[in-house]
Amino acid sequence: MCGIIGYIGQRQAQPILLSSLSRLEYRGYDSCGIAVASSGLEVYKDAVRVEALAKVLLQLDGTAGVGHTRWATHGEPSQVNAHPHCDCNGNIAVVHNGVINNFQKLKQQLISEGHSFVSETDTEVIPHLIEKYYDGNLEKAIEAALLDIEGSYAIIVLMVGEPKLVAARRDSPLIIGIGDRENFIASDVPAILDYTNRVIYLEDGDIGVITADSIKVRGEGTEVKRKQHRISWSIEDAQKAGYEHFMLKEIHEQPKVIRDTLGRYLSATEPVADWAMITDTGLENILILACGTSYNAALVGKYILEELVGIPVRAELASEFNYYGQALARTGAIAITQSGETADTLKAIKRLKGLGGKVVAIANVVGSTASRIADQTVYTLAGPEISVAATKSFTAQLMALYWLALSHSKLDISRRDGLITGLRRLPGKVQQVLDSEDEIKEGAEYLSKYKDVFFIGRGINFPVALEGALKLKEISYIHAEGYAAGELKHGPFALLSSDTPVIAIVAQDNTYEAMLTNIKEVKARGSPVVALAGEGNEAIGELVDSVIIVPQVDAIFSPVVNTVALQLLAYYAARFRGCSIDFPRNLAKSVTVE
Ligand code: F6R
């Protein structure tokens, strides 16, 4: 996720901006830059680390400036795509965090009005819009520009000749740091904590104007007073936004991740991927390749695509495909990888391409190796995932799969519209799961005392059982296995006893009755059962030992709410056991060896 900082005061801005940017490095970034106002605007930026940028910088003379660490979403990491971005005359510098959904339309309009663009970013439309509307009043020009923008943003604007910084936010956080004859604006607390611990949190729709000696906030057109807060966090706490672990922070980011990822797809003016490229291969099926959690997303994708598009889909482990699958090689494929650097997945992509296949990658890291070697890439907008255990990237991958399927489905209009409405409601449904954290925590405390746990699911929730087990084992070190519920009786029954709890994912779909039968079979062997069930299905409590209730959604979206609940379950179980949650033993975030 991008990080932003603005400074105005009595001191030289450059060293403050650079040290604040280094405090934002933990968020993950691929490029950085600063702009300082002196007689004109001095802008330095590149696809390098902050330390490397600092080394090549001349000493800039100016007491106001903005800085940015970029996590690429539109356009590869490069010098031109790095922030700050400027207007045609180089008078206005903007740093931006967020996603502008309608930037292509705005860009075309601005080009037809004589503006010229240098980058591939969505951000660059902002300084041009401000330039277009500027008639001597910077705040008014920014307000007018923001009216044109659809999407999310936290921005800071610096303009030559205007001794102030102006900031605005919608759906992306922004704070003002209050200093002594100096003030700051930042995307989050760590950026300013070396200088002040007094902050104001801007609210959606706010426009903040700061000078060295004043702070003004306008909300809905009038001046408003926002409360000051004193931060008592250490830098480390602040980087986790007050959450105890990055994993918990990332679990809680999921409503926004869904909104951002869907926002990008739903507003796309061109197809998200050229479906014909992967289906017109003479073979009427699709192959999805991935590893680990991304493979579990691939398995969910199989159900989504088969149901919505009506085409047979095979999900294969990339690491296995590399040693068989010759017969599948001449097919179209989707490769799913958060990092875009997983060695097994990259090898599978290369192998397929070498055999004449076409590959669409679903990746989270712009410019990653997968995106460079695939024929096309659909990006997820999960932002950098720091915790080793994948959480928000899985949810974002599902959004890409839903959207790929919906945009190529032959469903009737009313079913399609109903599903799109369901997708739009998902951030709220996921928030409901997050709001029931305390109830899930109780279940986790209970589980944390066991050595072995089974997760069972059916249909589209079978991969959710696999993912629930994977999350639990990797961070809590409890031995966990995910099973298709009907398979337990074909062997694993031998392990069932009062010492092996079973988590049953109960979906309100055509698998419901069969799942009830499986639960009864498990109970008859003495295992305690915890059911994960949708609202309205509280009666299942009579059959099992405890129930975790998740919001009711269309069955095809149930993997989203169920997985979020299981992520929390694993997280708290690991916490009760005192495990190293963000960096579990023996694991790495990016597995770059076979
Ligand atoms: C589990 C986890 C791993 C990754 C796997 C693939 O929580 O994070 O199983 O999902 O290593 O990684 P990507 O998606 O980067 O290819």
Image: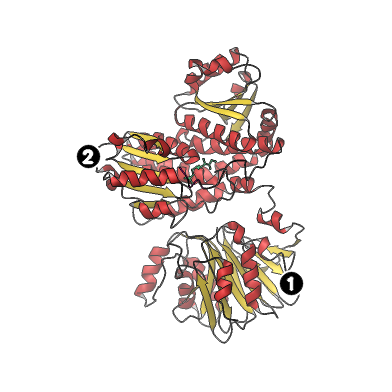
- Vertical position of residue 392 compared to residue 300: above or below: below
Query: For the residue marked with disc 2, what is the amino acid?
Result: Gly
Tell me the residue at 51%/72% (across/down): 45
In the image, 501 versus 325, the foreground residue is 325
Q: Quadrant of residue 416?
A: top left
Q: Is 406 left, or right, of 446 in this rendering? A: left
Numbered range of the magenta stretch: 590-594
Q: Is residue 116 visible?
A: yes
Q: Is residue 24 magenta?
A: no
Q: Which residue does the numbered mark 2 point to in the structure image?
A: 282
Alpha-carbon distance for marks 1 and 2? 66 Å
The C terminus sits in image quarter:
top left
Q: Which residue does the numbered mark 1 point to in the structure image?
A: 179
Residue 538 on image: x %, y %: 60, 26
Q: Which mark is residue 362?
A: none
Q: Comparing marks 1 and 2, which lies closer to the viewer?
A: 2
Q: Quadrant of residue 451?
A: top right
Residue 190 on image: x %, y %: 67, 61
